[in-house]
Every structure is written in structure tokens, then in C-alpha cells.
Image (spheres, helix red, strand yellow):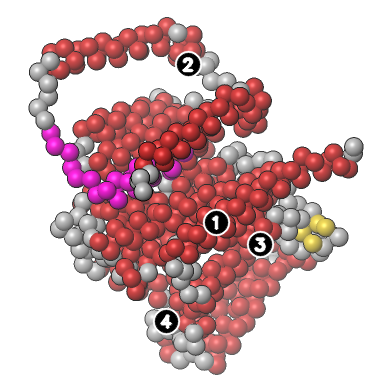
């Protein structure tokens, strides 16, 4: 096996393990750290796909900014560990198999779709994602309106949160 | 053996990482020595002088002391995170150094590998920011997992400070990136090649003086150094986020802090001070003999010190130092060697100058108050660096139009 393949399976394994840990962990901060782990390994997967810019931004934005705020809030609130309740009786016989079927369906359609097939054949990666200049041209020329509209949407969301959180005087 | 011959790039990278690790570890140890000694002299004290001649073996003694101290873990702490935090801090602090080019890419090993950089990435700058943006976790988790009021307060302060100043740090650098049009470190350095009026180097610190000052202030805050060392305000919160740490875990936080200092100094050198380019005009060809001459002067001083000042075992130690410095100085006078090491020589000289400035500030300035720190970061530094970015971008767009309408 070549080194990228070994790296891929290693990172994929760690990412899935982190995602499972994220759900199973009782301490909120352990969950947050597991999410950081998932995001960092995803960044390495992006690197392996030939998209270094996306990988770096993934780490900077998600692991370095969003999750730091999460950890910060958890620390400030000093959130205690979760309490476990018994799993719903329906969940075991119906939920788990259905979830598994959903996973298989996702895998199947990704495999059959042109994008997934191209990735599986090793022809999916284009150089556009690797080139910062091309990427920024796409963001600021081709998709300028959706890009700016999204940022305004996020700003509105922040303002909304501020209004909701403000104490009435 | 088969694996080694199949993956020469990987093997070369591992070898370079090991060499770099050794150099950086030594540099970290002697940075702590230099800090103590410099501050002591600024404050009219002697500093360390008992262990070895001039206290030169003090870092070694400190390391051994840290290794053999009892390692206490508070019973109410979160054991896993408590143990992981110092490792995380140190690993993140050191890994950025692998991306730094210490010399020109034209110097290569016989197999074509670049000699002075471990990883010459196209997006080097972005990856450095990616790794440093994770640096908050070491501090935040250390404080939280200790389960102590002082640690938690220290780490909250520290993470708030790092998050706030990271914004200004990143924005102040974008001006340079716009001027150079690249994120690769070697290209960023090459773009600063040349001279104004035949003697002023075209370094970014002149056109981007505002960006440079913003970067420097933000970098000091980002590395939690005086006058922004709020996380360790001894008079208020004992020792901040590492109050509960002892033994080598405690030392690891200090090594991480020094590693971060080295990283931001390297970045400042690359982005604003011309990296491994020489400050002297190219036509002065004698400048390649400067490192050798400097080492020979050092050797002469050591020889004089050995004869005139030293007694007993210290005299023997200093004689060895003299011989090493003199030998290295003579080696550096060989033209081929001198040509090879001129890049790293200027790079290290600039880094050392910045580090000296860091230590000088620590010996001189008092600490900010917390609200002053926050209002300074958000209300002054961020607007100024944003204005710098906007003006630089406007200049790049409109200057060609003005010259060739």
C-alpha cells in the first residue's frame, strides 16, 4: 500500500472513531474535543484529495475558531456531565437497522453518482481546488452574489442572537 | 531497507525533522538562559552564573531538575486532558517550525532535496496560521482540566486574549500577501529582493510599517508575553493556567511558549524583514565572510576570558568553547561554506534581534490591565490593521491606473 492510502485509512478511522466518541462521551468538553479531532482529520482527508486551501481553512475556521468558542462556552458555563436515560424501546429493533440501511443507501448513491464514481476512479480531483487564485476567482467573480449573500445571512443570524440574548431593561 | 530506498522523500524529511528538532530544543533551552541573563543584566544583577562558566550549563541543570521532580496530578482533575494539554501545547508550538525556510531553496542536497526547509508548501503561511489557531487548546484545556479556580480564570483570560489578537495578527499579514501575491514563504522572501536608492533593502517593513507594528504587537499578545502576560498575572491568579502543573509538564508549557516566540519571530522575519536575504547590497561580496569573522571575534573574546577571568574547571570549559568557536569561525571562512551558510546566518541574526527585543520588553514594561488589553485589541489594533489592509488593497488596484491612465 502506498503512503497516501495508509494515511487515508488512518484518518478515516480516527474521524469515524472521533464521531462515535462525540456522541458517546458524557462530559461536554470531551464531546467538543472529539469534534475537533473529527475536523482535523477531515482536513487531512481534504489534503489527500488535493485541496490544501480547503484543508487549511477547515482547520482555521472550524477547529481553530468555531470549536474554540464552543470550548470557551462550555468552560464558562461549567456544564456538568450528561445524565443517561434508557434507550427508547423502539430505537433498538427499528432505529438501528434503519440507520444502517440509510448509511448503505448513502454509500450506494455516492458510488453511482458521477462525482463519487470519479473520486473512486481517481479522476475526481481537479486542480481548481488546489489553486488559490482560481478558487478566489470563483468565490469573488463567478459566485460573488451567493458568497456575499451568505455572509450577510450569517451577520443577520448574529444580530438575531444578540437581540434574543439582550436583557430587557 | 527496501522501504527506505522506495521513499527517499520521506526519509529525507524525517532526517531533517530530527536535526531541526535537536537545534530547536537546544535553542529553546538557551533562550531561557538568555532571557534570565539579559533580564538580570538589565536589572543590575548577575543572573545564573554558578553552573558552568558564565552559567552556561544552567539549562541542562534546569532540565534535569524538572525531570526528577515529583509529578503531581490534582485528584479532582480530568486526568486524560490534564496530561494531554502540555503535550498538545508543545507539539503545536514546535510543528510550525517545520514549515519555515531557514535558507534559500537554491541550496540543495545531492539528491535534490532542499537543504534548509523541511516542508516548502505552496500555502505555507496559511498552514502556519492553521496550526497556531489550534494553539489555544493547550492553554484552555490545561486550565479547565486542573479543576482549580486560578487555573480556570487564567485559561479563560488567556484564550479570550489569544482569540481576540489572532484576528489582528492575521489581518495585519494580509497586506504583505497582497503585495507579494503568494502564500509560499520562499516566494514571499524573494519578492523582497532588491534595493531602493541602491542601499535600502526592499523589505516589507518599510511600505507595510503599520502592518509590521500591528503584527508585532499582536504577536506579543498571541504568545502571552509581557506586557500582555495576563494569563500569568502572579499577583492576581497565582501562575494562571499552569498553576497546578509540576515537574516536566510544567517545563513543557515553558518550552511551548518559547517555541511560539521563535515561530512568530520567524514569521516576522519572513514577512517583513526579508527572511534569509542580506540587508547589505549584493555588490559587497565580502559580506559572506561576516559569520566567520563574527565567530572569530567571539573566539578571541572567549580566549581572553579564559586567560584573564576563569579559574579551575570553568577555565577548561571555556577553553573548549574557545576552540569550538574558533574552529567554526575558520570553517566559515572557506568560500564554499560561507556561500552556503549566508542565508541561515542572516535569518538567525534577524530572529535573534527580534527575540532580544522580546526579552528587552519583558525587562522594561509593566503588565496591562485586563480591560485595557481587550479595548486595545478590539478598539485600536483591529481597526488600524483593517485600515492598513484597505489602503494597501486600494493602492495595489489604483496605483497602476494612475501611472498608466
Q: CA distance from mark 1 to mark 3?
A: 36 Å
Marks 1 and 4: in contact by CB < 8 Å?
no
- Residue to which mark 1 is pinned: B379
Q: CA distance from mark 2 to mark 1?
A: 47 Å
Per the rendering, the mark at residue B48 is: 4
Residue under disc 4 on the same chain as residue under disc 1: yes
Q: Is residue B145 above or below residue B363?
A: above
- Residue to which mark 2 is pinned: A119
Find residue B237 and report its image quarter. Answer: bottom left
Magenta-drawn segment: A61-84
- Residue to which mark 3 is pinned: B346
Residue B115 in sight: no
Asked whether residue A73 is drawn in magenta, I would say yes
Other residues around mark 3 within 10 Å, as few (<14) / some (14–19) / many (≥20): many
Indicate the secondary structure of the residue bearing disc 3: helix
Q: Chain of mark 1?
A: B
Mark positioned earlier in the residue sequence (3 or 4): 4
Residue under disc 2 on the same chain as residue under disc 1: no
Other residues around mark 1 within 10 Å, as few (<14) / some (14–19) / many (≥20): few
Mark positioned earlier in the residue sequence (1 or 3): 3
Residue A124 at x, y percent in the picture: 52, 16
In this picture, residue A150 sits left or right of residue B175 = left
In this picture, residue B37 sits left or right of residue B113 = left
Mark positioned earlier in the residue sequence (4 or 1): 4
Residue B1 at x, y percent in the picture: 42, 37
Q: CA distance from mark 4 to mark 1?
A: 41 Å
Amino acid at each position: 500500500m502506498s503512503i497516501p492510502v495508509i494515511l487515508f485509512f488512518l484518518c478515516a478511522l480516527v474521524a469515524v472513531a472521533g464521531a462515535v466518541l462525540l456522541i458517546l462521551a458524557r462530559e461536554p468538553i470531551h464531546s467538543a474535543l472529539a469534534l475537533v479531532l473529527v475536523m482535523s482529520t477531515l482536513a487531512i482527508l481534504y489534503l489527500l484529495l488535493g485541496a490544501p486551501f480547503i484543508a487549511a481553512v477547515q482547520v482555521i475556521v472550524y477547529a481553530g475558531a468555531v470549536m474554540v468558542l464552543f470550548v470557551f462556552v462550555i468552560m464558562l458555563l461549567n456544564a456538568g456531565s450528561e445524565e443517561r436515560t434508557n434507550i427508547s424501546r423502539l430505537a433498538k429493533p427499528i432505529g438501528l437497522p434503519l440507520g444502517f440501511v440509510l448509511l448503505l443507501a448513502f454509500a450506494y448513491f455516492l458510488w453511482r453518482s458521477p462525482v463519487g464514481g470519479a473520486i473512486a476512479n481517481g479522476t475526481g480531483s481537479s486542480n481548481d481546488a488546489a489553486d488559490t487564485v482560481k478558487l478566489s476567482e470563483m468565490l469573488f467573480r463567478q459566485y460573488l452574489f451567493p458568497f456575499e449573500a451568505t455572509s450577510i445571512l450569517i451577520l443577520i443570524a448574529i444580530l438575531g442572537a444578540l437581540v434574543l440574548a439582550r436583557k430587557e431593561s | 531497507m527496501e522501504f527506505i530506498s522506495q521513499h527517499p522523500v520521506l526519509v529525507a524529511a524525517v532526517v531533517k525533522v530530527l536535526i531541526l528538532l535537536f537545534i530547536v530544543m537546544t535553542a529553546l533551552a538557551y533562550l531561557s538562559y538568555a532571557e534570565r541573563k539579559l533580564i538580570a543584566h538589565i536589572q543590575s544583577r548577575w543572573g545564573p552564573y554558578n553552573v558552568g562558566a558564565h552559567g552556561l550549563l544552567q539549562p541542562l541543570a534546569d532540565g534535569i531538575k524538572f525531570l526528577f521532580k515529583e509529578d503531581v496530578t490534582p485528584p479532582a482533575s480530568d486526568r486524560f486532558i490534564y496530561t494531554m494539554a502540555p503535550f498538545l501545547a508543545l507539539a503545536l508550538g514546535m510543528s510550525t517550525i517545520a514549515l519555515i525556510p531557514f535558507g534559500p531553496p537554491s541550496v540543495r542536497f545531492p539528491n535534490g532535496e532542499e537543504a534548509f526547509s523541511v516542508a516548502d508548501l505552496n500555502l505555507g503561511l496559511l498552514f502556519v496560521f492553521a496550526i497556531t489557531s489550534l494553539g489555544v487548546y493547550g492553554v484552555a484545556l490545561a486550565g479547565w482540566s486542573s479543576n482549580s479556580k486560578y487555573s480556570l480564570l487564567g485559561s479563560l483570560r488567556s484564550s479570550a486574549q489569544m482569540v481576540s489578537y489572532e484576528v489582528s495578527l492575521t489581518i495585519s499579514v494580509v497586506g504583505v500577501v497582497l503585495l507579494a501575491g503568494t502564500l509560499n514563504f520562499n516566494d514571499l522572501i524573494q519578492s523582497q529582493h532588491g534595493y531602493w536608492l541602491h542601499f535600502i533593502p526592499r523589505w516589507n517593513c518599510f511600505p507595510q510599517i503599520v502592518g509590521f507594528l500591528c503584527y508585532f504587537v499582536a504577536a506579543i499578545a498571541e504568545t502571552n508575553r509581557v506586557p500582555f502576560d495576563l494569563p500569568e498575572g502572579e499577583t492576581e491568579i497565582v501562575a494562571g493556567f499552569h498553576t497546578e502543573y509540576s515537574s516536566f509538564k510544567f517545563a513543557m508549557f515553558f518550552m511551548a511558549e518559547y517555541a511560539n516566540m521563535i515561530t512568530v519571530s520567524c514569521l516576522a522575519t519572513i514577512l517583513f524583514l526579508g527572511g534569509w536575504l542580506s540587508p547589505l547590497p549584493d555588490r559587497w561580496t565580502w559580506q559572506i565572510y561576516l559569520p566567520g569573522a563574527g565567530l572569530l571575534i567571539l573566539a578571541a573574546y572567549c580566549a581572553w576570558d579564559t586567560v584573564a577571568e576563569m579559574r579551575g574547571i570553568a577555565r577548561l570549559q571555556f577553553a573548549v568553547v574557545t576552540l569550538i568557536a574558533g574552529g567554526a569561525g575558520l570553517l566559515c571562512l572557506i568560500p564554499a561554506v560561507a556561500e552556503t551558510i549566508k542565508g541561515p546566518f542572516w535569518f538567525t541574526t534577524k530572529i535573534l534581534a527580534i527575540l532580544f527585543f522580546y526579552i528587552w520588553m519583558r525587562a522594561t514594561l509593566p503588565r496591562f490591565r485586563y480591560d485595557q488589553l481587550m479595548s486595545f485589541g478590539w478598539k485600536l489594533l483591529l481597526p488600524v490593521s483593517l485600515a492598513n489592509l484597505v489602503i494597501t488593497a486600494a493602492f495595489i488596484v489604483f496605483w497602476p491606473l494612475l501611472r498608466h491612465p
